[in-house]
Amino acid sequence: MRYCVVGALIGLIGLSPALAQNGDRKGHDKMGKIVPEDLIPSAPVLSVDEALKTFTIEKGFVIEPVAAEPLVDKPVALTFDPSGRMWVCEMRGYMPDIDGKLESRATGRIAILEDTNGDGKVDKRTTFLDKIVLPRAISLVPGGILYGDQNNLYFVARDGDKPKGKALVVDDKFAPGGNVEHKTNGLMTGIDNWLYNAKSNARFKFIPGENKVIKESTAFRGQWGISRDNFGRLFHNSNSTLLIGDRVLPNLLNGNKSAKMKAKTTERIGSNAVFPGRVTPGLNRAYISSHNGYSSNTIDPKTFKLTNATGACGPVIYRGNNLPASVNGNGFVCESSAQLIKMIGIEDENGTLKGSHPLEKRDFLTSTDERFRPVNMYNSPDGSLYILDMYHGIIQHKTYMTTYLRGQTLSRGLEGPGYGHGRIYRIRSSSKPLAKVEDLAKVSDIELIKKLDSPIGAVRDLAQKELIDRNADPKPIVAALATGAAADLTNIHLLWTLEGLGALRAKHLVGALTSKNEELISSALYAALSLTDSELIKLESLVAAVRATAMTAPYIARILAATPSPVAQEMLVALLKKHHGVSLVREAAIS
């Protein structure tokens, strides 16, 4: 094998202030190539059919295209509407050339993608909005959409699939400062009906009829991509940490703005080890190697593959019914610089999240195509998982690009084409059919309530949101709760739907607070924070009967602290004496 060490030319580049790259570190003047040149494959632009041949996926699963160019171009984020159509943010301006000179041009778009004949593939595209600078987040709201660009959060009214009027800035500090890799993204609806983001400490709620948002502080989370589990806990990550999970429901400890909380509220879930399907010379700091005299190795000096994540993004917690039950609740994470998807097992041990790597020393999906750039993943209404692939040669932003990576990029022609490619893939079971996607916009409120019992998380979420957006009559929802026949997970959605409609009352929480399911109990206690003082007092005897466990105790503390009565305060004191060593309980009590 022949090592092609960067010689005089790269040495001169490293010494020249005019030619050095923004990502070059002081003292990192040894940037010799690490991977033997004869092991590095070429990186031509592949058709979708050709790209499919480069994938290796775990047995029992299938990867197939849902949409590709020219129907989609550099997809980075999406949301589903009640009809099951995708609304996709296309960040066409991201690094269109090696120097990112044209990045600030308003080339981004929001497109509606739909499957009109039911064959599982997109056959119709409607450009809803264009001339956007680096769009990165989208949420459908009554009467229009919210979307985030490089700086602001906007509301755009709509008439069907067409915008109506000009975009209104509803938050001019949505994505402040930083570069494109480090700006707010997400707008994911939480179980509590708030919109949450990565790379942000703000959450939002849209006010129908007023065309504005409420903005509140929340814990700072992640970098790119955000997801949640069935309970409602949020999951996120950073480029070098595959998966991070919140230990409690969002904002449980954010009620007291004057208190600085110190409790550990997140857990790193599993290790950051990755197992690419190809050599990985195209990493920003692959030059950090014993071959170049460094004390550590970014890539394995024997296999020449990345060993730990450096481009992790777009996590999702699988909540569908198409993939095997054994992976339900698992995390899936994109590693865009190493062309792979990681699967992480997640377990809750007495309120503490633990991670495992069920596939051990291999990854769920790998590709040998260097242009495969998975950047986000979503649960689909058909029960499968969707992957957004920018399909772009350059994934590292100019702010951090090193001289080494620039050379790697140019050597394989990865600097172009700047536009015109992008794919959305589906991961499904090889042995189970996909669920039929129903148009929830056309069903009755009663049918929507039934959908809250769907085994598909994306369907439950859409049904909950649609009921709230319609301002549905709460009586049938209350009736569904009153039967006591609904599953625990369904009851969580029923309660939060009532909360979103402003119709939740103490009497609606009786069944949940007397159940044996700790997630349902905890969710009910948290939802109760939206009640008036007089309604909270009605819950005293029920709360007193709830067993305080590692999971429920913080929620009990928070609700007792919020209840304005001597009885509640006495119960809180007793709880704190028993759990004085648990920081989550102490801090929930002063939230």
Image (cartoon, rainbow, N blue to C red):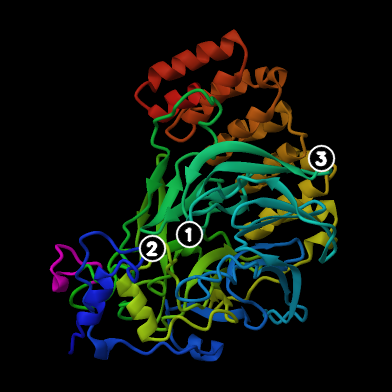
| Disc on the earlier residue, 3 or 1 | 1
Q: Nearer the viewer, residue 523 or 197?
A: 197
Tell me which numbered mark, 1 or 2, is placed earlier along the sequence: 1
- The residue under label 1 is 181
Q: Where is residue 34 in the image (x, y as percent from the top left)?
A: 22, 78
Q: Is residue 312 left or right of residue 483?
A: left
What's the magenta bit mostly, secondary-structure-wise? loop
Q: Residue 291 lies in magenta, yes or no?
A: yes
Q: Residue at x 36, y 75 (%)?
A: 406
Q: Mark 3: which amino acid? A: Pro
CB under 8 Å between callouts 3 and 1?
Answer: no
Secondary structure under tag 2 reads loop
Residue 35 place in picture, x, y as percent: 24, 81
Which is in the foreground here, disc 2 or disc 3?
A: 2
Quadrant assignment for the N terminus:
bottom left
The dot on residue 474 is 3
Secondary structure category for the residue under label 1: helix
- Residue 475 place in picture, x, y as percent: 83, 39
Viewer can see residue 99: yes
Q: In this view, does 300 lie to the left or right of 280?
A: left
Q: Do the residues labelled 1 and 2 touch (CB within 8 Å)?
A: yes
Measuring from the top left, give residue 425's x and y in whole percent.
56, 76
Sooner in the amino-acid sequence: mark 2 or mark 3: 2
Give the residue drawn at x 49%, y 22%. 589
Count neighbours of disc 3 (C-alpha within 10 A) and say few if under 14, some if 14 to 19, many if 20 or more. some
What span is in magenta? 289-299
Q: Mark 2 points at which residue?
A: 400
Other residues around mark 1 within 10 Å, as few (<14) / some (14–19) / many (≥20): some
How crowded is the residue under tag 2: few (<14 C-alpha within 10 Å), some, or many (20+)?
Answer: some
